[in-house]
């Protein structure tokens, strides 16, 4: 049978980088083909060429056996290819129907007073959307406004949008990254239903368990090359991780039983607002003790970002109290909070974690550059900063050509390692880690997890905020679940099953 998509010897170069190196890839009709690889392995580049965002330097793309050239996504869409990006391409203030028909609007005959102007045919569009939703089991209300929909529903809108454009080849890029376990299970049911009706799917994911559960075939890229294709029956999580990284990877977090000490972070009745002056965190209370990891679970957008910013002095507190080691820091500045022994791994490493134009060595002293031994009487001690940088690059395996390399040129995993090295290279009592492995491959994730557990073993209190439920369950000693800005339940790890935590994440209170 002729593959619906085939790449032959696809090569793509960027300045100083060989992103794809003679990649041969096939997608058969009615299959789910998972694509795995480390950050920078070339997955996204390959898919962007299939969707017309990039053009290959060498090789060819075939659709249903015919060679094609894509100059932009419109060319790909005309060939029946649709892509659902990790970050949804929806306009929040518009309705489901308006988002779906945007760019492919149909009109009805004009009314007399409009002259030659046609009228937008929303009725036909809504009817077609309902038909697609019913046919593929996608619960979508054509009249709903996007900003009022939960994340799982927004993703269904994205899928309907591709089907509305008559796509029968679907590329899903990290589709479960922001879903609850229940929403992810619903997505897999939808994917199977799509396949039964002849749709072919490329499924990109870092979650090996999901890939093994839903894929028909699995291909792995490493350093831009296709290193192998297998099936779930022939593979394990361990074998896939080794194919991705090129070495054995520990997928389970080894840690001793927690022996919590005295409370380090105490939060009582915390209340703060979001950027639109709406209540984002409402009457939140919890504590984190020395030598334990408290995981905050929840679907992204339920107040986690505002909570972390309030705890680190980056957002004003409207009500309640925050104390660290008994010291009131409710209205303290970020530097004051840092200086009492709080380390912070931010959610957005590029926006809040690094000065991208600075070299690696300078980023490694961003919060200590003004103190000895890095400065004396406001004069920087450059030799000491260089020595410090070289030591941390080696200790934390930061892969950079030089300590003078700009941080903007590092991979995502090495940027994250730079932040972790900076924050953990000084004495700390509390570590706040927000989405510490988001977008990282299994090798970098293994490294970061090991460091978090190491801090906990050394008696540091760790507050872990993550939308990845597997990460929360593997690292935490206790799990608190946040929904719509409130903590709706706190469970010891022994009682925190995926199903129980997933229901709390969806707002189902016990």
Image (cartoon, rainbow, N blue to C red):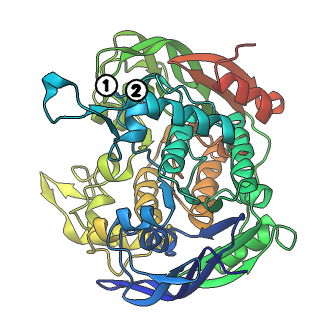
State whether residue 189 is above or below residue 233: above
User: Would you say residue 290 is visible in this rendering?
Assistant: no
Other-residue count near label 1 (Cα within 10 Å), few / some / many at <14 / 14–19 / ≥20: many
The quarter of the picture where the N terminus appears is bottom right
Instruction: Please name the residue shown 49% across and 57% down the image.
Output: 83
Instruction: Please name the residue shown 14% across and 22% down the image.
Output: 113
- Label 2's element? helix
Mark positioned earlier in the residue sequence (2 or 1): 2
State whether residue 292 is above or below residue 51: above
Q: Nearer the viewer, residue 320 or 228?
A: 228
Q: Nearer the viewer, residue 314 or 395?
A: 314
The quarter of the picture where the C terminus appears is top right
Q: Nearer the viewer, residue 373 or 30?
A: 30
Query: Number of numbered discs present?
Result: 2
- The location of residue 98, given as percent across then percent down, is 37, 33
Relative to 28, is 497 on the left or the right?
A: right
- The location of residue 80, given as percent across then percent down, is 51, 62
Instruction: Please name the residue shown 39% across and 80% down the image.
Output: 69
Q: Between tags 2 and 1, which lies in front? A: 2
State whether residue 93 is above or below residue 165: above
User: Would you say residue 352 is visible in this rendering?
Assistant: yes
Q: Image quarter for residue 112?
A: top left
- Label 1's element? loop
- Estimate the spatial distance between the alpha carbons at disc 2 and disc 1, rounded to whole Å: 7 Å
Residue indicated by mark 1: 315
Q: Image quarter for residue 178?
A: top right
Q: Nearer the viewer, residue 417 or 227?
A: 227
Circles 2, 1 touching at the beta carbon (< 8 Å): yes
Instruction: Please name the residue shown 50% across and 25% down the image.
Output: 149
List the single residue furthest toward the right: 233
Residue indicated by mark 2: 306
């Amino acid at each position: 049978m002729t593959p619906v998509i085939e790449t032959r010897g696809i090569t793509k170069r960027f300045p100083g980088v060989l992103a794809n190196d003679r990649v041969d890839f096939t997608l058969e009709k009615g299959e789910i083909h998972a694509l795995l690889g480390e950050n920078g392995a070339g997955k996204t580049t390959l898919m962007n060429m299939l969707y017309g965002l990039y053009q290959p330097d060498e090789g060819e793309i075939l659709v249903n056996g015919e060679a094609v050239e894509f100059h932009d996504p419109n060319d790909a869409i005309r060939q029946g290819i649709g892509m659902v990006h990790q970050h949804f391409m929806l306009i929040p203030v518009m309705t489901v129907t308006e988002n779906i028909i945007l760019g492919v609007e149909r009109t009805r005959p004009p009314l007399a007073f409009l002259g030659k102007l046609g009228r937008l045919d929303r009725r036909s569009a809504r009817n077609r959307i309902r038909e697609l939703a019913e046919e593929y089991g996608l619960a979508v209300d054509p009249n709903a406004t996007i900003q009022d929909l939960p994340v799982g529903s927004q993703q269904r809108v994205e899928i309907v949008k591709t089907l509305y454009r008559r796509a029968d080849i679907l590329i899903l890029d990290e589709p479960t990254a922001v879903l609850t376990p229940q929403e992810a299970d619903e997505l897999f049911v939808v994917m199977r239903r799509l396949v039964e009706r002849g749709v072919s799917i490329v499924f990109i994911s870092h979650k090996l368990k999901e890939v093994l559960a839903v894929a028909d075939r699995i291909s792995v890229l490493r350093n831009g090359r296709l290193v192998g294709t297998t099936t779930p029956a022939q593979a394990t999580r361990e074998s896939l991780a080794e194919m991705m990284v090129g070495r054995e990877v520990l997928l389970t977090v080894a840690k001793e039983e927690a022996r919590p000490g005295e409370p380090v972070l105490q939060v009582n009745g915390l209340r703060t607002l979001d950027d639109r002056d709406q209540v984002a965190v409402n009457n939140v209370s919890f504590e984190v003790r020395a030598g334990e990891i408290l995981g905050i679970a929840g679907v992204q957008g339920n107040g986690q970002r505002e909570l972390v910013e309030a705890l680190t002095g980056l957002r004003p507190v409207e009500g309640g109290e925050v104390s660290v080691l008994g010291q009131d820091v409710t209205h303290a500045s970020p530097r004051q909070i840092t200086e009492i022994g709080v380390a912070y791994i931010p959610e957005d490493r590029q926006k809040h974690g690094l000065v991208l134009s600075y070299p690696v060595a300078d980023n490694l002293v961003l919060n200590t550059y003004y103190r000895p031994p890095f400065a004396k009487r406001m004069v920087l001690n450059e030799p000491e900063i260089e020595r410090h940088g070289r030591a941390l690059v080696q200790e934390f395996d930061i892969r950079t050509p030089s300590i003078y390399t700009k941080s903007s040129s590092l991979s995502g995993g090495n940027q994250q390692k730079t932040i972790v090295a900076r924050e953990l290279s000084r004495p700390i009592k509390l570590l706040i880690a927000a989405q510490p492995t988001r977008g990282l491959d299994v090798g970098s994730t293994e490294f970061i997890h090991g460091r978090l557990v190491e801090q906990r073993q050394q008696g540091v209190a760790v507050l872990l905020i993550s939308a990845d439920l597997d990460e929360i369950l593997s690292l935490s000693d206790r799990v608190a679940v946040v929904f719509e800005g409130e903590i709706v339940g706190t469970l010891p790890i022994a009682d925190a099953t995926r199903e129980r935590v997933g229901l709390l994440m969806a707002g189902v209170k016990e």
